[in-house]
């Protein structure tokens, strides 16, 4: 920790004292920890003792640099993450204790005072030239104008507005998102995962070995609301960034195809320059075992029917991207040549559908045994998928851009996906866990990343 960090801890303490929050911290922290389930007694007691000791050091004025990791966890679960953000300290931007709606309105922060850039260097993505091609994919970190502005300010250049639907759709019951601290390594590509994750779990901001599990169920505001918000979001995007919009249809057979087309047209009407089709969601509820449906892209014919119909429904000027989940060799090789003539880009991967339980054996997400695993645990799957996608593009002389994602948590994992041929690289779990991820990638690679283009 630097001297600046130490000054920041002092600033946080001063603010906590000023707001009269210090004495109440242990109770507020434990209320957050137990919001959705209660930790085993020994773990609960240990957390309570740590929070008490921290509070005593804060009250006595002798909290120091070494307290920052615990202070961050305590303030995040106590609902006071904004105090850290204002001091410029890293804290996850999404409040997992809050509702989807509350979070749409307000990223917790921190936000850089000035958008970091790689100077005048630009990269080509989907026909535009953008800053260092790191972005945030379709997810709750990009579901409103507030988030789009936040991500642009923090240095991201390829943003995908969170999947929206043709009618309002509520989120699944909370909790919707937790850290998965036991998943610290990349699993073999496409591996079935059995994840243990508790709602009070925590991984310190900036840890590259971070994984998360989520079960939101692709919530969507009603079209009149997201269309107006999308228009405002697009107006906030400068010449060095790109905002795609992810859409999803509902129903089966021709209903599904028509709903995808109608929703894509609504996004186009709101001004979307590029539409991404979410063909890969692992979190749609169903009455089947596990409580959720498999991703649509596992059915090649249904996928091609959707993409063909949407392409016909859109103006020629509107770009089209198909987002896939990890597919095995045969599935991907069968699908890509059929999609390539229809799309401008292929994105992947989505989260890996996994069995997720709490440490006491109950489902982490009530009523849904299966949820989406992402972060470092899926990085191997992302590398494997991207390598095969790029090879299929080259072998077939196909033309489409590759938007790669899965386990990008630091500059090295960003660079690895770019180096194997991705045109843009996005991060959801990594961006959640490290609000300064884009800034760190720009600082590490902004001057050297290959394939930059001249802009006039
Ligand atoms: C909380 C959360 C919500 C997500 N919501 C969506 C979504 O609405 N649409 C979508 O296409 N992908 C969604 N994703 C998947 C991400 O876009 C991304 O494909 C996946 O998380 C892998 O990237 P990561 O390892 O960087 O997290 C979501 C992921 C997370 C973590």
Image (cartoon, rainbow, N blue to C red):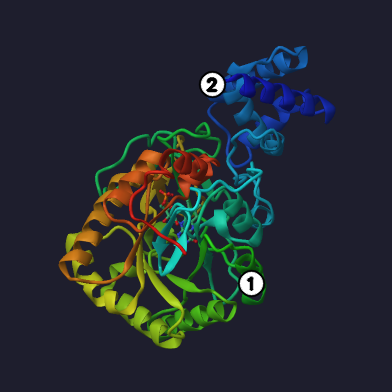
Cα gap from disc 1 to disc 2, whole angstroms: 50 Å
* Disc number placed over residue 231 in the picture, else none: 1
| Snapshot quadrant of residue 67 | top right
Mark 1 crowd level (few <14, some 14–19, many ≥20, 10 Å Cα): some
Mark 2 crowd level (few <14, some 14–19, many ≥20, 10 Å Cα): few
Question: Which of pointers 1 and 2 lies earlier in the amino acid sequence?
Answer: 2
Element type where label 1 sits in the image: helix
Question: Number of callouts in the render?
Answer: 2
Q: Nearer the viewer, residue 423 or 378?
A: 423
Q: x, y percentage for residue 427?
A: 45, 50
Residue at the spot 63% in from the left edge and 23% down from the top edge: 4
Q: Quadrant of the N terminus?
A: top right
Residue at the spot 49% in from the left edge and 34% down from the top edge: 206
* Residue 194 visible in the displayed image: no
Asked if the residues shown at circle 1 and circle 2 are in contact, with their CB atoms under 8 angstroms apart, the answer is: no
Q: Nearer the viewer, residue 105 or 180?
A: 105
Q: x, y percentage for residue 383?
A: 28, 49
Residue linked to disc 2: 42
- Left or right of 335: which side holds 229? right
Residue at the spot 62% in from the left edge and 65% down from the top edge: 233
Quarter for ligand 1? Answer: bottom left
- Left or right of 193: which side holds 79? right
Residue at the spot 65% in from the left edge and 57% down from the top edge: 104
Q: x, y percentage for residue 247?
A: 49, 71
Q: x, y percentage for residue 167?
A: 58, 76
Asked if 260 appears above or below 330 in the picture, the reply is: below
- Left or right of 250: which side holds 8? right
Ligand 1 within 8 A of label 1's CB?
no
């Amino acid at each position: 920790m630097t001297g600046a960090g130490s000054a920041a801890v002092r600033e946080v303490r001063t603010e906590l004292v000023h707001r009269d929050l210090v004495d109440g911290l242990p109770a507020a922290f434990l209320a957050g920890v137990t919001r959705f389930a209660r930790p085993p007694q020994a773990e609960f007691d240990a957390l309570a003792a740590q929070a008490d000791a921290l509070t005593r050091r804060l009250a006595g004025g002798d909290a120091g640099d070494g307290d920052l990791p615990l202070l961050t966890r305590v303030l995040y679960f106590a609902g006071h993450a904004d105090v850290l953000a204002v001091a410029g300290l890293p804290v996850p931007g999404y409040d997992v204790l809050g509702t989807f709606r509350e979070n749409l309105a307000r990223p917790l922060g921190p936000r850089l005072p000035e958008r970091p850039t790689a100077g005048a260097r630009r990269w080509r993505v989907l026909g535009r030239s953008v800053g260092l091609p790191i972005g945030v994919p379709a997810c709750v970190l990009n579901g409103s104008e507030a988030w789009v502005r936040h991500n642009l300010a923090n240095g991201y250049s390829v943003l995908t507005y969170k999947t929206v639907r043709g009618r309002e759709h509520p989120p699944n019951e909370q909790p919707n998102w937790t850290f998965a601290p036991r998943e610290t390594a990349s699993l073999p590509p496409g591996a079935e995962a059995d994840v243990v994750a508790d709602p009070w779990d925590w991984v310190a901001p900036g840890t590259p070995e971070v994984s998360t599990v989520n079960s939101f169920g692709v919530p969507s505001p009603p079209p009149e609301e997201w269309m107006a918000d999308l228009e405002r979001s697009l107006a906030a995007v400068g010449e060095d960034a790109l905002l795609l919009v992810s859409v999803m249809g509902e129903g089966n057979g021709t209903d599904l195809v028509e709903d995808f087309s109608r929703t894509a047209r609504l996004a186009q009407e709101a001004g979307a320059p590029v539409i991404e089709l979410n063909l890969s969601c692992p979190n749609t509820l169903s009455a089947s075992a596990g409580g959720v449906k498999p991703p649509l892209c596992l059915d090649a014919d249904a996928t091609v029917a959707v993409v063909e119909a949407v392409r016909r429904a859109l103006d020629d000027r509107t770009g089209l991207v198909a987002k896939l989940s990890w597919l095995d060799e045969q599935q991907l090789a069968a699908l890509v040549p059929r999609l390539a003539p229809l799309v401008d880009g292929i994105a992947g991967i989505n989260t890996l559908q996994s069995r997720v339980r709490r440490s006491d054996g109950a489902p982490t997400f009530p009523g849904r045994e299966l949820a989406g695993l992402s972060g470092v645990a899926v990085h191997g799957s992302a590398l494997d998928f991207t390598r095969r996608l790029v090879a299929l593009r080259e072998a077939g002389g196909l033309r489409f851009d590759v938007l790669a994602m899965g386990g990008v948590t630091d500059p090295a994992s960003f660079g690895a996906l770019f180096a194997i041929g991705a045109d843009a690289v996005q991060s959801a779990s990594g961006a959640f866990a490290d609000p300064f991820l884009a800034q760190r990638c720009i600082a590490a690679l902004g001057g050297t990343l290959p394939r930059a283009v001249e802009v006039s």
